[in-house]
Structures are given as structure tokens and as C-alpha cells.
Amino acid sequence: MPDSILEIGKSALETSEMKAKMLMNNVANAQTPGYRKSDVITSSFPLALENATRSVEAPKVIGAYNNLQYGAMFKTGASTDLAIGGDGYFVVQSNEGEFYTRDGRFYIDSEGNLLTSSGNFPVMGQAGPISISRGSKLEISKTGAVIVDNVQTDQVRVVKFDKPSSLVSVNNSLFKSPPEGLSYQEDTSPNIAQGFLESSNVSVINEMTNIITTQRSYELAAKIIKDREADMQKMIEIGKPAQ
């Protein structure tokens, strides 16, 4: 029969490794505009260890989630940088269909297409992909109107989801609908700030604290395994017939 203490310890090691990787990814993207931090939901290692004599259930990852809390706005002054001052997501077009993002780092390519800096996806307007002649004066109004050389040419698409927590992360900055779909409404009057970006919602201090806590959990699990293996080795030695 498998040893429950060893099983719990090994599972705790795997869980701690997964959590540490996610936390380090959050820290690495702390300066990525529109990035949403993620974390894992785990069962309790101490509780599983306490119940080891009654159950072989080990601590494990039971889910993951994206924290969708908004980040702070900061000024860039670039005419193609946009931030949403409230609910909603920009709509961009990918080969997989529509993606949604609050990362408003956009640029105009040589053909006049407004694209995302991450992935080079076309930014969608109510009339389709937004197109702007290079060298033209670009204004994006608070309500999302695209004004080129003082003429409105389109409206930036911004959508609001009934259950944004159900969005599936592509890279924690881009999201897509789950396979079963997700209802949303077109926001025809979003609160858009031109020349601003929304920062990541990652707190480096909090994430570093969590990394230290996770490291300690890993060390505890490793010690449990080491001590248990030593005890088992002693029992094996005791059980050997005398020479």
C-alpha cells in the first residue's frame, strides 16, 4: 500500500512548485499594462497532513483563477494608447475569433491598421477593423469615437460581460469566451482615456511575500518526505534478519 505521508508530501511539493511558477509569472509581468494576476486554489497541506491517518487525500491544486481587479491608470501621451475608465474590454480579432483585453497599447502599421502591440491583432470598431491613415491626426473621444483629421470614421468596440470571471485567459492580458459562449453587451459610450494605459494589477510586494510563503511550504513538504523515508529505512533495517 502507498504510504499516505509520502503521498501527501509529494503532492505538496508539486502544488508548491505550480504556485511558485504562477507567482513568478505575475512578478515578471508586473509592468505589463492590462495584465491580470493569476493564482491557484489549493487544498490545505497542514489539514491533509493532520488527517493522514484517516485519509490518503493529498493537498492538490483544485482550480485557478484570474484576479480581474482593475489596475491604476498612468499617462503616456501617445495618441494610440487607450485605457478604459470603468468596466469593459476592447475587442480584437485573432485567428481563433474575438479576443478581449484591457491592454490598450495599440499602434498603426504601415497599411494604416490599428493593431495591438502584443500579438499584432486588429483592434475592432463598430464598422470592423479600425483603419487610420498614417500621419493623420487621431483623436479618440471619451465615448470611443474614432476621429481622423476632425472627421469621425468609426467607434471603438468595447464590450461588457455579465460574468467576466468566466473569461478564459490566453496570456493574462488577452481573454476569450469559454467554449459554451459568454453573454455580453456592446458599450456604446465607454469611458475611454486617450494617451493613458491601465497598469497591471500585480503588487510586487504581495507576490514576493507569497513566493516566500510558498517556498517555506515547499521546504516543509521536503522535510516531511525526508524524515518519513528515513523512518521507513530504519524499519527496514530493524526488520532484517540477524546475520
Image: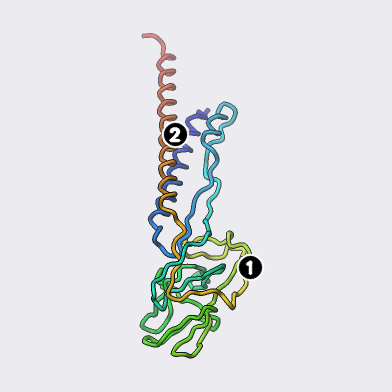
Instruction: Rate crowding at label 2 as few (under 14), some (14 to 19) or many (20 or more) other CA atoms within 10 Å.
Output: many
Q: How many marks?
A: 2
Instruction: Rate crowding at label 1 as few (under 14), some (14 to 19) or many (20 or more) other CA atoms within 10 Å.
Output: few
Residue 221 disc label: 2
Residue 28 higher or lower than 120, as above or below: above
Q: Earlier in the sequence, mark 2 or mark 1?
A: 1
- Give the residue at x 44% y 69%: 197
Amino acid type, residue under disc 2 in the picture? Ala
Residue 170 higher or lower than 188, as above or below: above
- The type of colouring in the image is rainbow
Between 76 and 169, the one lying in front of the other is 76
> Which residue is label 1 attached to?
183
Residue 82 higher or lower than 22, as above or below: below
Q: Is residue 62 left or right of residue 77?
A: right
Image quarter where the C terminus lies is: top left
On the image, which quarter does residue 226 sit in?
Answer: top left
Amino acid type, residue under disc 1 in the picture? Ser
Residue 64 in percent (x, y) is at: 53, 51
Q: CA distance from mark 2 to mark 1?
A: 43 Å
On the image, which quarter does residue 115 sit in?
Answer: bottom left
Identify the element where label 1 is drawn. Answer: loop
- Give the residue at x 41% y 45%: 211
Q: Residue furthest top?
A: 243
- Give the residue at x 49% y 90%: 151
Residue 53 in percent (x, y) is at: 57, 26
